Amino acid sequence: MSQKVNILIVDDHPFIIQGYKNVINLFPDKSITFQFFEATDCRSGYDIIMQANEPYDIAFLDVSMPEYEEKNIHTGEDLAKLLNAEMPQCKVALLTMHSESLKVQSIIEEINPVGLVIKNDLTFDNMILALTTILKGETYYSDSVIKFLNNQQKEKVYVDVIDRQILHYLSKGINYDDIPLYISISSSSVKTRKENMKELLNIVGSDDETLVALAKDRGMLL
């Protein structure tokens, strides 16, 4: 008996979407048929989730994509949170070029996806293995993610959602005094958190641009 699996793929590079589809269509279990749904940025990703006629079974989401500011959807992680809320049975896998330990950690702690793949780890065989694992209801992490998890206790650093929101608005050129207009936090708390992040990154007496640049390099900010 044939099993139909609805797969949502969101990536801002259409040729990558096509590549994923080509690999998935070669899945060895021919009793499974795949129906694909595609989006190429946060806006179209939001729309295809909210306007879906039937739930998606699996979603492969790129992390870094053009934003949908009006709906506060800035990354694939935000789309993952939306899917978790709207379609809790959907198995979400995130794919990213960012292999920094802080980025991997934040994705696991905030999203807890059933799949997390560093794109540099991705091969034909790994994509098939990831799909097989997820269809079985198990969690798939690519090699770089596993390496991070093995070293996690030695490298444990925590950056919470508020810190990441502060970094996001600083990266948009918004002064820290004005950030409370966008999130529920006082300007003094913003300043304290900003200084704590500078200390975390061993930054002394530098401007916000340096903080944002280094945070982005370390995976704290896309």
Image (spheres, helix red, strand yellow):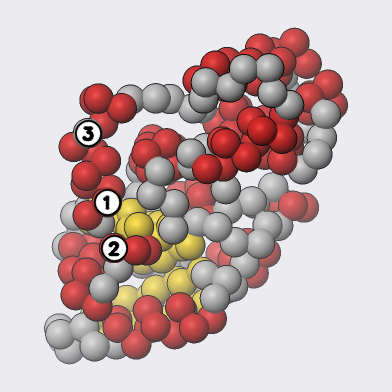
Find disc 3 in the rendering and name its residue: 151
The amino acid type found where label 3 is placed reads Asn
- Camera-nearest residue between 151 and 115: 151
| SS state under label 3 | loop
| SS state under label 2 | helix
Q: Quadrant of residue 129?
A: bottom left
Q: Residue at 37% of width from left, 63% of height from top?
A: 119
The amino acid type found where label 2 is placed reads Asp
Distance CA(mark 2)–CA(mark 1): 7 Å
Q: Quadrant of residue 32?
A: bottom left
Find disc 1 in the rendering and name its residue: 144
- Camera-nearest residue between 11 and 118: 118
Distance CA(mark 1)–CA(mark 3): 11 Å
**Left or right: 55 as drawn, with respect to 177:** left
**Left or right: 86 as drawn, with respect to 126:** right
Tell me the number on the disc at residue 121. 2
The amino acid type found where label 1 is placed reads Ser
**Left or right: 175 as drawn, with respect to 64:** right
